[in-house]
Amino acid sequence: MSWHKIIECVPNFSEGRDLEKIDRIVAPFRGKAGVKLLDYSNDEDHNRLVVTVVGEPEALRDAVLEAIGVAVQLIDLNHHKGQHPRMGAVDVVPFIPIKNTTMEEAIALSKEVAAQVAELYQLPAFLYEKSATAPHRENLAAVRKGEFEGMAVKMQAPEWQPDFGVAAPHPTAGVVAIGARMPLVAYNINLSTQNLEIATQIAKNIRHVNGGFRYVKAMGVELTDRHITQVSINMTDYTRTALYRVFELVRIEARRYGVTIVGSEIIGLVPMEALIDTASYYLGLENFSMQQVLETRIME
């Protein structure tokens, strides 16, 4: 890619089961100049679609707006059920500066998109993370609390007026959180138990808000098709809290219940450094650096 500026966007849509709808939502990211679709994955249990796309700011903005319009048209949250909490057809839209861009530019882009979705689609928008207009709006979990069903009442409170749009959710598409943030690793650890209380308690023990790791958000999820449960984790800064530390703490916490880890998964894309750091730990590599990774040297 010969682009001068590159920003990443990882929009989350509340549809993980209808493949035709998923294809229509993803379509605006295909075959566009200045935009490249890197990855998308849908989860039926979570009933959620995660798209990873990069592009030049203006081209990325236009593609994201088009995809949001499709989702607002296709998704009715009055008939949506899934394991993952959600407040909108387009639940969250983060922008991440990647190359020759600053966090300030990503924040400006997020505000532009938020203003446009409110105007074009009558979809109220909250600004979160680095774009937040108040400290209590920074944490996505706080913004999303109450979910779609409770948002109408929540938005009547002065402290929860949307940043853009009217103070009432869209009747079928709810509301959306849009912001700028650091790269995030969506990392899930699966447990050998169907007991959701165990997964939920482990999630509480490892997440920052309950005294766990500083850059970890987590919740327990039931994977009904596989008859197991999962600790679903967002690593908000993998450079400060490593994946292997979280994995090992989950293993330790699970042991007290006689439960083991049956596997883990990365959702979407992950920075190479996050995996190299974990590989170095388990292999006991001494004095290893990213400069010894072949792909790193090729890309220089």
Image (cartoon, grey):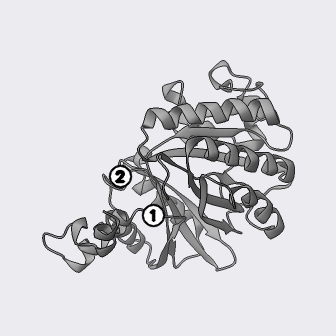
The residue at the point 48 percent across, 55 percent down is 2
Q: Horizontal and vertical percent for residue 221?
A: 60, 64
At a point 61% along the width and 36% down the height, the residue shown is 143
Residue 224 falls left or right of residue 173: left
Q: Name which of mark 2 and mark 1 comes first in the sequence.
A: 2
Q: Residues within 10 Å of mark 1 (few under 14, many from 20)?
A: some
The amino acid at mark 2 is: Phe
Mark 2 burial class by Cα count in 10 Å: few <14, some 14-19, many 20+: some
Q: In this view, does 19 lie to the left or right of 236?
A: right
Q: Is residue 197 above or below residue 170?
A: below
- Residue 285: quadrant of the picture: bottom left
Can you tell which mark lies on residue 9?
A: none
Residue 240 rendering spot, x and y as whole percentages: 30, 52
Q: Mark 2 points at which residue?
A: 213
Q: Where is residue 33 in the image (x, y as percent from the top left)?
A: 64, 54
Tell me the quarter of the picture where residue 152 sits: top right
Q: Which residue is drawn at 54% across and 24% down?
A: 133
Task: Look at label 1 and name its amino acid.
Answer: Val
Secondary structure beneath dot 1 equals: loop
Mark 2 vs 1: CB contact within 8 A: no
- Report whether 76 appears left or right of 15: right
Question: What element does badge 2 sit on?
Answer: loop
- Closer to the camera in the image, 182 or 147: 182
Identify the image quadrant of residue 150.
Answer: top right
Q: Which of 14 and 262 is in front in this view?
A: 14
Given residues 112 and 149, the one toward you in this image is 112
Residue position for label 1? 270
Residue at the top extreme, as displayed: 158
Residue 193, given in percent of the width and then of the height, sits at: 55, 76
Q: Which residue is drawn at 83% across and 52% down?
A: 75
